Image (cartoon, rainbow, N blue to C red):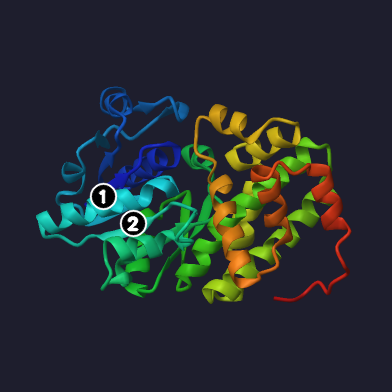
Amino acid sequence: MTKIAVLGNGSWGSVLGSLLADNGNDVVFFGNNEKVNQEINEKHTNTHYMKDWSLNPNAVATADLEEAVKGAEVVLFVLPTAAVRIVAKNLRQVLDKLGTSPILITATKGIEPGSKKLISEILTEEVYPNDADKIVAISGPSHAENVAQKDLTAISCASTSKENSEMVQKLFSNSYMRLYTNDDLIGVEVGGAVKNVIAIAAGILYGKGYGDNAKAALMTRGLAEIARLGVSRFDAKPMTFSGLSGIGDLIVTCTSVNSRNWRAGKQIGEGKSLDYVLENMGQVVEGATTVKAVHELCQEDGIDMPINEAIYHVLYENANVDEEISKMMGRAPKPEIRL
């Protein structure tokens, strides 16, 4: 049995923590919402995030970070991107006090605006500046609702340490969850983060009444943009984007009503404002934050990402959706395969 601290008890955190408890591990959730913690402890449910579903009753929740990570061999981050850095700083202080150095797993998919850093880079800075091998990322096509229903799921498990990625692979794998190891940590994270922006675009097209041809074109060209950013800026491996954390995650996020990024885009395509969508979603729309960071990266490095730029203009510069679509369709002809 492995003790695992799960930082974040939203939908994805709850489902992953429950899965790990199903696999026979000792799981403690950390979250700052006492009402959610109490419900997990007393009723083994988390109805705000996951209706009509029960967690493994052996998993418990606490608002005390030290209590959560004391004795933990693994700490799993399942927090919104905006919360990762401050929690990581607090975690470093707790680990120094306890004298422990657990493996860190990130299931958060995002890029931090301002610093423009991936989650593994934030965790390296704040927790393990001299031991980045202790950081592992899991990413791939995996809606929480489907995993909760034990739908067959396969995702990537990436680290600069083969030993640690294989350990995490064994930790999560069971009859309905299969993990594949990958040594391209950065590439796996880029795919998981930027596909959320493309999912907003897919939702917008649906909300505007476009069909399958438009969706297929968007996803294919969106994948090209993701790979271009990953290779040009982060030195990722091109083949990573043909895998589960690239095309796999893009497919599920751009085609499912379970995707909050897709749902946000759909409402924007129907004419609702970003402020309205974010206020009424009930959960974080990571793509709306990631698009800012990617926009900054494009400006700095001169990376051509017209879909991302169009979404940025629509969300933050009040650009007209129809005009942005016309601009993209009217761009100068280009070869299909390029970086």
Q: Mark 1 Cα within 10 Å, few/some/many (few <14, many 20+)? A: many
- Which numbered dot is residue 4? 1
Q: Quadrant of residue 57?
A: top left
Q: Residue at x 87, y 67 (%)?
A: 332
Q: Find the distance from the CA under tag 1 to the CA under tag 2.
A: 10 Å
Q: Mark 2 Cα within 10 Å, few/some/many (few <14, many 20+)? A: some
Residue 168, percent from left and from top: 35, 61
Q: Which residue is mark 2?
A: 171
SS class, disc 1 = strand
In the rendered image, the vertical position of residue 234 relative to residue 168, given as above or below: below
Q: Residue at x 38, y 46 (%)?
A: 83
Task: Locate residue 138 relative to residue 141 in the image: left or right.
Answer: left
The residue type indicated by label 1 comes to Ile
Using the image as rendered, state which of residue 296 and residue 8 is in the foreground: 296
The answer to whether the residues at label 1 and label 2 have Cβ atoms under 8 Å apart is yes
In the rendered image, the vertical position of residue 196 relative to residue 135, given as above or below: above
In the rendered image, the vertical position of residue 279 relative to residue 124, given as above or below: above
